[in-house]
Image: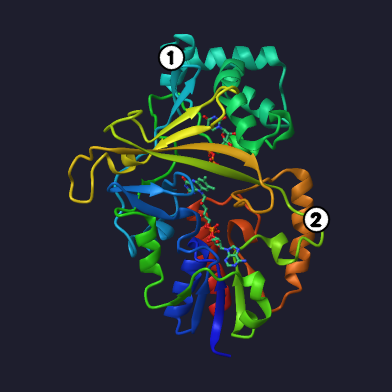
Amino acid sequence: MKYDYLVVGAGLFGAVFARQAADAGKRVLVIDKRPHIAGNVYTEAVEGIQVHQYGAHIFHTNDKAVWAYVQRFAEFNRFTNSPVANYHGELYSLPFNMYTFNRMWGVVTPAQAEAKIAEQRRAAGITEPRNLEEQAISLVGTDIYEKLIKGYTQKQWGRACTDLPAFIIKRLPVRFTFDNNYFNALYQGIPVGGYTAMVARMLAGIEVRLNTDYLADKAALDALADRVVYTGPIDAYFGNCLGPLAYRSVRFETEVLDQPNFQGNAAVNYTDAETPWTRIIEHKWFEFGKGADGQDLPKTVISREYSSEWKPGDEPYYPVNDAQNGALYKAYKALAEKEEKVVFGGRLGEYKYYDMDQVIASALSCAERLLR
Ligand code: FAD
Ligand code: UDP
C-alpha cells in the first residue's frame, strides 16, 4: 500500500484528520470530487472580497481546544454575527432579544417582554412542546413565531413547522438583554484572508487530488491505502441501497454590484413566506468592507439563498434530522460499522447537523482514536 490513509473529502473534517495523521507520521492522500479544497467552507476572492461560495460561514465556538487548534492555521478577525430580519419591509434584530421585543411590541423592560411572551404562551396552551412550532411559541410567543420564524423555517426546510423537530429552533438564543450577537459563543470570527487559505495551511505538505470522485473509482482508490476516511454522504457510499436519505440543498444567486453598500449588513433574513429567497448575504461585511490592504472597496458582492429539497445532481447541504430519516440513517450506520477498512465522518458521513467547530472536534477525536 502506498498510503496509510485515503481521506475522501477535503472539507474541514478531511483536512483536520489528514493534518493529524500526517503529523503522526502517516502517509496520507486526500481526494475531493470538487475542483477545489475546503468543502463547504470554500471562499474565493471576487473584486477583492472573500465570497463564501457555499453559504455564509461564521466560525463560533465554546471549545477552547478547537479555538486554539484553528489559530494554528489562521488569524481570526473580530466579526460578530448580527443578522437582521426583514418581514415585508419591517426590520427586526436577531437573535431574539430586547431590540426585537421592543420593535415587535413596544416593550421597554425585560419584565415587560417576559410577561408578553408568557401571555402568548398561555393563550396557545402549550405545556410540553412536541415540535418546532410549539417550541418556538413557548420560547418567544406567537407574534415572533408568525413574523420571524414560521415563513423562514418553512422555506428553509420545505416542511411545516409542526413536522420539524424542536431542537432546530433551540439553536437560536433568546435573550432579555440588548445583545444582537447571534451566537452564545466564547470565541467568534472569520479567518483573515478566507477559509480556503486556512484549509490550505491545514493541508500543507499533504498530497491532494482534486476532481477525483471516490465512488466512481472505488476499487482502484481503495487499493492505494490501508484505511479510508470517508466524508461524503453515507447513503451514496452504499449506493442508496436502503433508499435515499433526505437532504436540503441551497442554490446561490451571486451578483457583483457596482455600488459600495447594498444592505449595510452581512446577513439579512427574509422571514416572510412570500419572498422566494431565505436570505441575502453581502460578503464584504464579514471583513468590515475592507480589502486585504485595508482599503474601502468600491463594489460589493451579494448572494441570494434559495433553499430546496435535494435531488440527484444537487449538492447535499443539510441533513434532515426528522424521525424517518433518523431511522434510515441508523440502518446505514449499522452497515457502516461492518466496513472494517472505512471510517465515516463529517456532516454527510455522519448525517449530523454539525457546525464547523463540532466537525473539527469530531475529526480530532476520530484522529486520536485511529492514530493511537
Ligand atoms: P464538507 O465541507 O461538505 O466536505 C465534504 C467534502 O467531501 C466535499 O468537499 C465533497 O466534495 C467531498 N466529497 C463528497 N463525496 C465525495 C466523493 N464521492 N469523492 C470525493 N469527494 C467527495 N457552520 C458554522 O460553524 N458556522 C456557520 O455559519 C455555518 N454556516 C453554514 C451555512 C451553510 C449554507 C451550510 C450548508 C453549512 C454551514 N455550516 C456552518 C456548517 C459547515 O459547513 C459544516 O460544519 C462543515 O463544512 C462540514 O465539514 P465536512 O468536512 O463534514 O463536510
Ligand atoms: N430561524 C428562523 N428565522 C430566522 C433565522 C433562523 O426561524 O430568521 C430558524 C430556522 O428554523 C433555522 C433555525 O432557526 O433552521 C436555526 O437557524 P440557524 O441560523 O442556526 O440556521 P443554519 O442556517 O445555521 O442552519
* Label number found at residue 238: none
Position of the C terminus, as image quadrant, is bottom right
Judge the density around disc 1: few (<14), some (14-19), many (≥20) Cα neighbours within 10 Å.
Answer: some
Which residue is nearer to you in this view: 214 or 265? 214
Q: Residue furthest right?
A: 242
Judge the density around disc 2: few (<14), some (14-19), many (≥20) Cα neighbours within 10 Å.
Answer: few
Q: Looking at the picture, how far across and down is residue 171, in whole percent?
A: 55, 38
Dot placed on the residue nearer the N-terminal end, 2 or 1: 1
* Label number found at residue 243: 2
Which residue is nearer to you in this view: 220 or 167? 220
Q: Which secondary structure lies at badge 1?
A: helix
Asked if one can make out residue 372 in the rendered structure from this viewpoint, the answer is no
Q: Looking at the picture, how far across and down is residue 155, in whole percent?
A: 62, 31
* Label number found at residue 102: 1
Total tally of numbered discs in the picture: 2
Q: Quadrant of residue 344?
A: bottom right
Q: Residue at x 56, y 77 (%)?
A: 6
Q: Looking at the picture, how far across and down is residue 65, in whole percent?
A: 42, 60
- Depth-wise, is mark 2 or mark 1 nearer the camera? 2
Q: Residue at x 69, y 26 (%)?
A: 134
Q: Residue furthest top?
A: 106
